[in-house]
Amino acid sequence: MHPTRVHDLDFAQVDIGREQRQGLPEVVYGPGKTPAQICAIVAELLRANTGPVLVTRVDAGTAADVLGHVPGGSYDVLAGLLVWRPAASNGFALTVVSGGTSDWSVATEAAAVAKAVGLAVTTVHDVGVAGLHRVLRVQEQLRESDAVVVLAGMEGALASVVGGLVGCPVIAVPVSTGYGASLEGVTALLAMHASCAAGLTVVNIDSGFGAAMAAHRLAWVRSRRS
């Protein structure tokens, strides 16, 4: 298969060559698509690829409709994630760390997507900087990780703290939790970009999916070179 091959479904140009280019089939963004459109895209991805097929940000009603027409999948209601053919673990140790319980939904998406694509995921919740001792208690676990995803709202300082504690890649996710001046995640986004912990990767606000994909790329490149 050519790595840039596309299948035309009229309403969608399905990138069936992405698995060859990036080690993972195209992931489907659920919002804005009808259940029938999602079914058609998923069926095409399952037919043309061999790896896991994912649909993100799916509500329970849409998920039930899609699974009724495309069997063999599973639905994680907390993550809003549909998955067919989840990958076996590749041993890449990813720790997903969230600052507060209010960050739970974004952290759940990051962990669920990462696990579905084959990463070995551990989650650590509610270790924000308002109680710095909480993250210090798990610092050895963080240091043993191959990568760490850090999710934080408010002022987003947890990413800098973790970035200073570990030597592995740190993927920071600004979360839209917080009071007025948090600006629905913009403050955390800017703080993470301006972090003095050099080398942080920063993804979009509330993008647990984007963080998981960044970790997947790290794992995929390592596997190709091992």
Image (cartoon, rainbow, N blue to C red):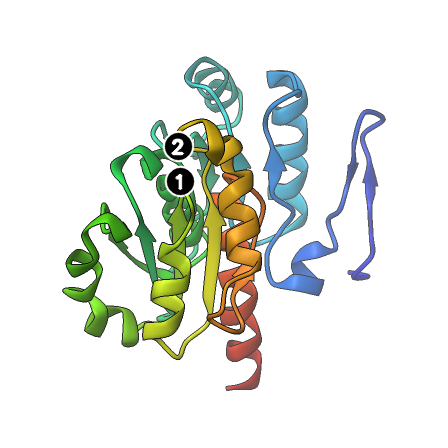
Tell me the amino acid under the disc marked 2: Gly
Which disc, if any, is residue 154?
1
Assign the N terminus to one quadrant of the image: bottom right
Residue 204 location, quadrant: top right
Query: Residue 174's mark?
Result: none
Secondary structure found at label 1? loop
Residue at far bottom of view: 226
Q: Nearer the viewer, residue 221 or 175?
A: 175
- Residue 178: assigned label: 2
Query: Secondary structure beneath disc 2?
Result: loop
Instruction: Give the Cα distance between marks 1 and 2.
Output: 5 Å
Foreground residue among 84 and 111: 111
Mark before the other along the chain sequence, 1 or 2: 1
Q: Are marks 1 and 2 in contact (CB under 8 Å)?
A: yes
Task: Decide: is 126 above or below 159.
Answer: above
Residue 73 visible to the viewer: yes
Residue 125 coordinates in the image, percent (x, y): 24, 47
